[in-house]
Amino acid sequence: MLFWVIAAVMTAVATLALLRPVVRTRSEVPDAPELHDIEVYRDQLSEVDRDVAEGLVDPVQAEVAKTEISRRLLGAARKSEAANPEGRVASNRGLRRAAVVLMALFMPIAALTAYLELGRPGMPQLPLSARLQADPQAGDVAMLISKAEQHLAENPEDGRGWDVLGPIYLRTGRYEDSATAFRKAISILGPSPARLSSLGEALFSASGGIVTEEANLAFQTARELDSTDPKPQFFLAVALAQSGKTSEARAAFSGMLETAPDGAPWIPAVQRQLAALLPESGAGPLSGAGAPAPGSPTAADIAAAQNMSPEDRQAMVASMIESLEAKLVDNPDNIAGWLRLVRSHVVTGDRDKAQAALDRAFAVFATASSERQQLSALAREFGLSETSTLGGVPVAPAVPAAGPDTSGAVKTPFILPPADANSSALRAPEPTRAAPATLAGPTQAQVTAAAEMPVEDRVAMIRSMIESLDAKLVQSPDNLDGWLQLVRSYSVMGDRSAAETALERSAAAFPADSEGGRALARLASELGLEPSLEGQ
């Protein structure tokens, strides 16, 4: 409404500015001198008539005077008519009136018509956040991102700016920048289900389609803050599939479909994942992008597989894995290929080949490279061994679980209770290597209380459990897994200063030149932390 008032005022001002010269033309035309003479002569004739009536002038003399005055009046009238004919004056007056009317009507009508044709009167105000999230084809997103980056460089504590920029980085393929932006937003604005889910998605994309430990923790925390959000449930189920827990992954995806609202846009993605995990499919689990893990089958391969027996399909998958291995011999620098190969061996149940492929991949890439970090993350996810040259923590190969856990402890890292059989399948993959306990499961009282808690109270409970882990590490400072989880937990919850402090404290138990010290240093690099570790 304010826009239309301003537009009306501006149109009126412009119209008046154009009408003013036309209106004032009539008053600024100089009158002819003869017109004044005519008035004088007419007054003189009237005065002679009054004098005759009062007997002040002789009638004969009066007649002579009137004749002379009349002669002068006629002469003045002829001169006036020659200087400004009456017809032209009337014509000019009519034209001016017509011009005034036309201009007063034309200007507003023309302006309104042009705006309705070329403008967008129904378009709301579009702030920077909306422009950044608009279709890249509709504007120069690169320029907007550049301006936003400049603004955030000058105002690094603008949490809302980081929260807006994170999804844009994610959409444009700048995954590591997106993860950094979400970490800063969480640090300034605090954790929320949406920010944590987006952080996990950025980390998932940056790792080439692997749910890393940090992404896993982010998704777990997001799910516990909002158990109705399908995104963390989906990625945690993908993590189960990637870790070889096919039956649990199938149960997780099936549970999502059973509780999905009609027409949910994510249903097809879940169905594709579930179809790839069915025993009769003979194929490995899909990655988050929906591509088969063993390789990239052609349309002909997929069509042929529909009529194959399970044995033939298994043989087909094996041949695709062999083809991928052969390609990596010719192109060993393909980190995405190595990650896919290791994952393929795991999901097909051949962990020995997965370990062998991982060892070969470790030998290709430099120690401090990002590729080695991705391989290390994959090894930890699947419970595989990292070589000593990596500087990571050596772990034992995965061993089958001795049996179902009868301890009754809740296995989620924080507070989310398993409401039913399906929800238990939604849990994140647990480490298969032997390791000291880290974050303890909540008590039954905490689970009961958490069920009715708002998000803010759940965040407070999670923070208290992290602080409990922190206190336990004071008593047992040689627990490397505990320190790694503590640092990650603080980082995911947005408390980067506490994460850096934890890294500094861990240096007392794990010097920089030790295996644990290198693992902590690598974690600091992954999270973008800057601790002042001794010896570095």
Image (spheres, rainbow, N blue to C red):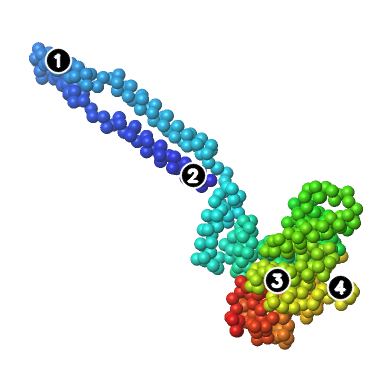
Q: Which residue is mark 2?
A: 5
Of badges 4 and 3, the one in the foreground is 3
Q: Amino acid at mark 1?
A: Arg
* Percent position of residue 136, x then y: 59, 50
* Percent position of residue 17, x then y: 37, 38
Tell which circle, 1 or 3, labels the residue nearer the N-terminal end.
1
The answer to which of 260 and 373 lies nearer the viewer is 373
- Residue in the image at 47% along x and 45% along y: 6
**Cα distance in 3D space between marks 1 and 4:** 136 Å
The count of marks equals 4
Q: Which residue is mark 4?
A: 400
The image quarter containing residue 498 is: bottom right
Q: Secondary structure at mark 1?
A: helix
**Cα distance in 3D space between marks 2 and 3:** 72 Å
Of badges 2 and 1, the one in the foreground is 2
Quick one: label 4, few (<14), some, or many (20+) residues within 10 Å? few
**Cα distance in 3D space between marks 4 and 2:** 75 Å
Q: Which residue is mark 3?
A: 363
